[in-house]
Image (cartoon, coloured by chain):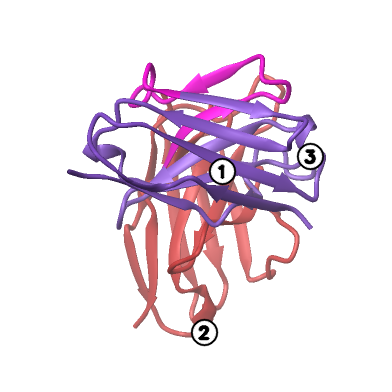
Chain colours: A red, B purple
């Protein structure tokens, strides 16, 4: 099974400042079809998860452009260019190259 | 608008059974694989099971293999999860989710979840 490891697990940030979350997979996420099925999800308190980014760097419909994804192979990053109050929540990386596996989650909170 | 609505959760004793349902609307249900994901109180997301579009292929997490059964009724646009031999560690909110064609293999659509509590 592919293990997803996120760092940090907690990220206190100042409003308007950037935030970055790293995600590492235990093996390459490049699928035999050439795609890398790495996604990022946001879960606000009391809500179901919401898809932000798919295939490493593609923003899903309605996601603000302050969210961006990058990476390749086994190392990936989610960046929030300027954190807003509504960005508070837990962020998960997730791979779907081989079944589905989620990272442990990173809690983003305002300092 | 895509909607996924779970139901069937509740309080059950250890060793008991429950069947969860996920009613889908707003998309061609029969064309998409469906998944169950659970989240224990205060914990992270854990994939539980998936089923392909016509129901001919299923897969399970090791923690539920042999106890849970995923199925679907494409005529009723409904996904199911039959949970038997329930344990305290199965206590969680259970979500159904799917990945639309525009975001392949990415879970863009989630239900609100249904809470399963296993306790005596």
Q: Residue at x 64, y 28 (%)?
A: B72
> Looking at the rendering, which quadrant does residue A81 occupy?
bottom right
- Residue B101: mark: 3
Q: Could you say where residue A8 lies in the image, as x and y percent from the top left? A: 33, 58
- Location of residue A65 with respect to B45 vertically, above or below: below
Q: Residue at x 75, y 60 (%)?
A: A61
Q: Could you say where residue B87 lies in the image, as x and y percent from the top left? A: 25, 33
In front here: A91 or A81? A91
Element type where label 3 sits in the image? loop
For the record, the magenta segment spans B45-68
In front here: A23 or B99? B99
Q: CA distance from mark 1 to mark 3?
A: 17 Å
Q: Residue at x 82, y 39 (%)?
A: B28
Q: CA distance from mark 2 to mark 3?
A: 34 Å
Earlier in the chain: of badge 1 and badge 3, it is 1
Q: Residue at x 53, y 78 (%)?
A: A86
Q: Could you say where residue A97 lies in the image, as x and y percent from the top left? A: 58, 29
Residue A95 visible within the image: no
Q: Mark 1 — residue? A: B96
> Looking at the rendering, which quadrant does residue A59 occupy?
bottom right
Judge depth for marks 1 and 3 and give the one in front.
Answer: 1
Same subunit, tags 2 and 3: no
Image position of A93 (left or right of A104): right
Q: Mark 2 — residue? A: A16
In front here: B81 or B1? B81
- Asked if the residue at tag 2 contacts the one at tag 1, i.e. Cβ–Cβ closer than 8 Å, the answer is no
- Location of residue A21 with respect to A34 vertically, above or below: below
Pointer 1 chain: B
Element type where label 1 sits in the image? strand
Image position of A48 (left or right of B1): left
CA neighbours of label 1 inside 10 A, class few (<14), some (14 to 19), many (20+): many
Judge depth for marks 1 and 2 and give the one in front.
Answer: 1
């Amino acid at each position: 099974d592919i293990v997803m490891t996120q760092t940090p697990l907690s990220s206190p940030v100042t409003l308007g400042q950037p935030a970055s979350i790293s995600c590492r997979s235990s093996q390459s996420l490049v699928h035999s079809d050439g795609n890398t099925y790495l996604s990022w999800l946001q879960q606000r308190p009391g809500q179901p998860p919401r898809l932000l980014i798919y295939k490493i760097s593609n923003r899903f419909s309605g996601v603000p452009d302050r969210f961006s994804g990058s990476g390749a192979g086994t190392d990936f990053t989610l960046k929030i260019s300027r954190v807003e109050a509504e960005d508070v929540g837990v962020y998960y990386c997730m791979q779907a190259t081989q079944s589905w596996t989620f990272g442990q989650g990173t809690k983003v909170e305002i300092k | 608008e895509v909607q996924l609505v779970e139901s069937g959760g509740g309080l059950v004793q250890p060793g008991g059974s429950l069947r969860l349902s996920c009613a889908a609307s707003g998309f061609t249900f029969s064309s998409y694989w469906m998944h169950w994901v659970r989240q224990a109180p205060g914990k992270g997301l854990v994939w539980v099971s998936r089923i392909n579009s016509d129901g001919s292929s299923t897969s399970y997490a090791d923690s539920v293999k042999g106890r849970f059964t995923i199925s679907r009724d494409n005529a009723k646009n409904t996904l199911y999860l039959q949970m038997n031999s329930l344990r305290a560690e199965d206590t969680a909110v259970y979500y159904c989710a799917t990945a639309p064609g525009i975001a392949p293999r990415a879970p863009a659509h989630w239900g609100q979840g249904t809470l399963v509590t296993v306790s005596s």
